Image (spheres, rainbow, N blue to C red):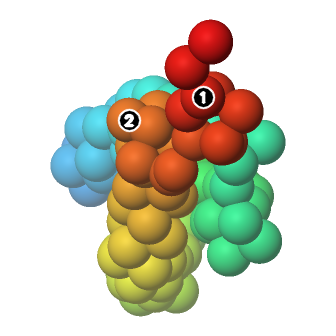
Amino acid sequence: MNELLQSNEKHQNLEAIQNYTAGFRGFNIACIVAFLLSLGFMALYFGSLESAQIVFYDYYVVFAIYNIAFYTLGPLQRQNLVRARKLTVYLPFGLLVLLQAISLVLILSVLDGLNLVNNNIYPPPTKDLEIT
């Protein structure tokens, strides 16, 4: 009988932990989707990225892996991660927002440079200006 009570208590604790961490499930899924979409978009322009943007790209990869790893952990480890969310969620997310703001400025300057090249704003060579 005592084993049954302990089993019920353990089961109730695990359910309470799952309910406690359920709020982060949606956040993690949204982060994973955003990260994977951003990684795909940035991969198209990887050759044109500057060093700060490559650091941002690597940070995205690490943060996506971290959020995916959250689902492979047991309930007790999930609870510990949620309890330590100031270091495991808020701090990286704040750093992410800062890096994203910097990267946005950098990528807009890169896209502006590509736009100048594509719109033929640069003077054409004199050989092309000559009429034959």
Q: How many marks?
A: 2
Amino acid found under the numbered disc labelled 2? Asn
User: Which residue occupies the extreme front position in the image?
Assistant: 132
Compare residues 52 and 6 and report the one nearer the observer.
52
Considering the numbered disc 1 on the image, is that residue within a helix, a strand or a loop? loop
Quarter of the image for the C terminus: give it.
top right
Q: Position of residue 116 (x, y in %)?
A: 43, 49
Q: Is residue 22 left or right of residue 29?
A: left
Please identify the quarter of the rendering in which residue 83 is found: bottom left
- Whether residue 123 appears in this view of the structure is yes
Residue 130 disc label: 1
- Whether residue 100 appears in this view of the structure is no
Amino acid found under the numbered disc labelled 1? Glu
Compare residues 52 and 22 and report the one nearer the observer.
52
- Tell me what residue is drawn at x 71 percent, y 33 percent: 127
Q: Is residue 50 left or right of residue 89?
A: right
Residue 119 disc label: 2
- Tell me what residue is drawn at x 68 percent, y 75 percent: 52
- Tell me what residue is drawn at x 69 percent, y 55 percent: 49
